[in-house]
Amino acid sequence: MKVLLANPRGFCAGVEMAVEVVDKVLELRGPPIFVFHEIVHNRHVVEDFQRRGVTFINNISEAPPNSIVIYSAHGISPAIRLQSKQRNLTEIDATCPLVTKVHLEVLRFAKQGYTIFFIGHANHDEALGTVGEAPHNIIVIESPEAVPHLSVPDETKVAYVTQTTLSVSEAQRTIEALKARFPHIKAPPKEDICYATTNRQKAVAVLSPEVDLVLVIGSKNSSNSQRLVDTAREAGKRAHLIDDTRELDPKWLQNTNGILVTAGASAPEHLVNQLLDRLKTEFHAEIETRTLVDEGVSFALPQSLKTLSVVS
């Protein structure tokens, strides 16, 4: 059995930064530490931090006054920041800089009086934070089918932004529908779907024609991981999203000569290695790494963490 290992895969720069932030706060202060929403959407990462004394909360009121709260990589709304200040919390912001970029685009468009279409999944943490920047100016669109039903105060003053973890092809269909409906629509200065999401989807699109099956390591609530499965299925391939090697069903491998293995941007590399070890041991797999691009991207730790370090 031939196994192609996609590269790039797994942790992106934003996830690496966010995970390192929680590690550093644990090192500097120790538990209890509170994180607003899951730091990244991966069950293994979250459970590991929980074992080390981190509490993940969905309401700021769950963090005791004067405690430490870390904001997840997906970003938060101004209302959450205000609630934290009212509780005198020490705020450590692990928002991915590429998500912050979308927030700033929303603020600029809103200040200029635009109605903003947010292309994304309405209940995703990233959507909730971004929409919270200008809730009266934003309309969330989940698919191109919603576009014909849109109504805005001024069709010449509209703009769009996107969630950073979308399917590139899915987002493009919605963007094209918006452009057809609103010829004057303003685009963000630079594409919002992040480099890591794009690169991982491209690797699946390029490599999946060579295999029969695509296995994606990632959690079910990870948008970018789900989109990798979608990309493989769009290419006509069988594809499954698994949290770890324990979820691998041997039946999937019957009459399968080639497998592509990849991982979502929030999935740790050791989970990939465990899957590869099982494929080699039980199915005599030969592994071949295919590199499409060397990302070489990193993000600095937030200034709020540096301040915490000085205080400590």
Image: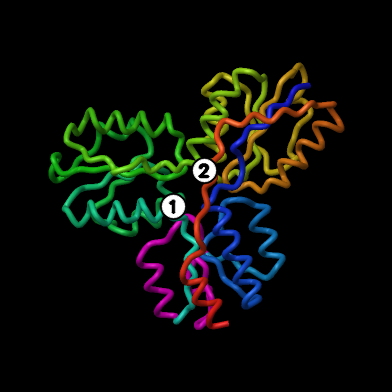
Q: Residue at x 70, y 68 (%)?
A: 52
Q: Residue at x 15, y 44 (%)?
A: 157
Front position in the image: 227 or 271: 271
- At label 2, the amino acid type is Ser
- At label 1, the amino acid type is Glu
Front position in the image: 19 or 172: 19
Relative to 31, residue 57 above or below? above
Q: Is residue 203 left or right of residue 86?
A: right
Q: Position of residue 26 (x, y in %)?
A: 64, 71
User: Which of the 4 quarters of the picture holds residue 244?
Assistant: top right
What SS does tag 1 mark?
helix
Total number of numbered labels?
A: 2
The residue that label 1 is drawn on is 126
Q: Which residues are magenta?
A: 58-87
Q: Which is nearer the N-term, disc 1 or disc 2?
A: 1
Front position in the image: 1 or 147: 1
Q: Quadrant of the C terminus?
A: bottom right
The residue that label 2 is drawn on is 223
Relative to 55, residue 281 above or below? above
Please tell me how crowded label 1 is: few (under 14), some (14-19), or many (20+) other residues with Cα within 10 Å.
many
Q: Position of residue 285 (x, y in %)?
A: 80, 26
Q: Position of residue 40 (x, y in %)?
A: 56, 54
Q: Residue at x 81, y 37 (%)?
A: 277
Q: Is residue 72 magenta?
A: yes
User: Which of the 4 quarters of the picture holds residue 85?
Assistant: bottom left
What SS does tag 2 mark?
helix
Relative to 39, residue 180 above or below? above
The reply to whether callout 1 and callout 2 are in contact (CB within 8 Å) is: yes
Q: Is residue 78 magenta?
A: yes
Q: Quadrant of the N terminus?
A: top right
Q: Position of residue 11 (x, y in %)?
A: 60, 47
